[in-house]
Image (cartoon, grey):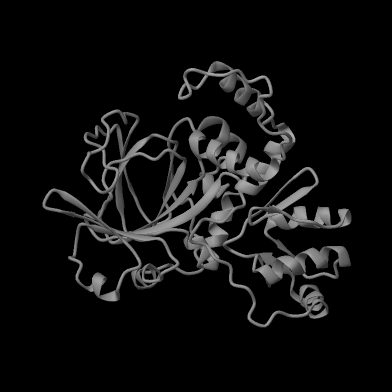
Amino acid sequence: MQLLGGLSPEEFLRDYWQKKPLLIRNAWSNFPELIDYARLTDLAQQSDVESRLIEYKEGRWKAESGPFRASRFSRLPETDWTVLVGNVNHLVPHIEDLLYQFNFLPYTRLDDLMISYAPPGGTVGPHYDSYDVFLLQVGGKKRWQISSDDASGFIEDAPIRVLKEFHPEQEWVLEHGDMLYLPPMYAHYGVAIEPGMTYSIGFRAPKTQEIAGKFLEFLQDELCLEGMYSDPQRQPTHKPAEIDNEFVGQIGEMLKNITWNDETIRRFVGSYFTEPKPHVFYDQPDEPLDLDEFAAAVAAGGIKIDAKALMLYESERVYANGEALEFEPEALPWLQKLADQRKLPAANYPESLITILYECYEYGYLQLS
């Protein structure tokens, strides 16, 4: 793959993924259009878009969260700031296409594509991420320094995660189309030399605590435990405020009824990893087609998954928007193909498939091509 500097996905995953950095010159040049500064700041003004502005002034870091007014950008100096916009793949079709060029990795891991713009001197400081990231330079030049030493900790009073100390081990200047892969916990420090963009392709790496909490929430809807507390052999007590061992033991026996198996975990994974982020809302069609009109439109132009949606499958289940879909068995191969390729070409599909596609279309998870 040119995206990986001529390495095959197998070679990249074997030799670099979560192991060591990789610099790829001329990794990507297929840009139908470039997101310029004006368009990026327009996105940063939208209320449903995650955006930040980071400045470094007189030795201190300053961070602001969007949405921003246009006047905020007109007051910026010529150097030493960065504007960042997340989930641009939800907003711009060719950015979505670029993100899914990384489909040699599972969609459960692929997160989003964030774009940052910086004039000369713009930076977010030396830091590390807890997840894998590809940093693609688009226009301009940026100097990247990296280090395997991330032990110094972060500056306590800084509004962003900036390392107290940074000791670079390697350094490169990235130009248009160059890309740097970094495994988790690898310290890096990028400073713009010329005005330009960095496209950051990030991967999901949820913390164990987060997964555990979400799984326990999931179990609340899964569990149906019989019985209730009882103590027919209770004896009088002289210490009414004491939590006695018998009571603790019986509560423990009740809690032992909370069990799960691989099937429960599979359903949780499908639900959790297709659940949209809190700021994401789907645009349902204002005047939806009826079922027959929808089938004709799919036959004429095909259908695709909405940029903000994710569809996953395992075994005979298919998930979208945090829920398992209900469909006839003959629709399964088509839904799996749709999930993998994120679109289906124009064709006359069976009624069983059209029925579930139409339901997803009404909710806004699918868009007609």
- Taking the spot 20% from the left edge, 43% from the top edge, the residue there is 157
In the rendered image of this protein, does residue 247 appear above or below residue 329?
above
Residue 8 visible at all = no
Task: Give how far across and how far down residue 186 sits, in percent.
Answer: 38, 35
* Residue drawn 27% across the image and 41% down it: 126
Residue 266: which quarter of the image? Answer: top right
From the viewer's side, name the closer residue of 64 and 148.
64
Number of numbered labels in the structure image: 0
Q: Is residue 323 left or right of residue 183?
A: right
- In the orientation shown, which residue stands out farthest toward the left? 58
Q: Position of residue 345 (x, y in %)?
A: 76, 66
* Residue at figure coordinates x 38%, y 69% from the top left: 36
* Depicted 305 relative to depicted 268: above or below: below
Q: Nearer the viewer, residue 1 or 93?
A: 93
Q: In the rendered view, does 148 fall on the left or right side of 264?
A: left
In the image, residue 61 lies at what x, y percent?
20, 50
Instruction: Indicate the quadrant where residue 293 lies.
Output: bottom right
The front one of 143 and 330 is: 330
Q: Quadrant of the C terminus?
A: bottom right
Decide if residue 121 is in sight here. yes
Q: Is residue 167 above or below residue 339?
A: above
126 left or right, relative to 253: left
Q: Nearer the viewer, residue 207 or 335?
A: 207
Residue drawn at x 45%, y 44% is 133
Residue 311, horizontal then vertical, whole percent:
67, 54
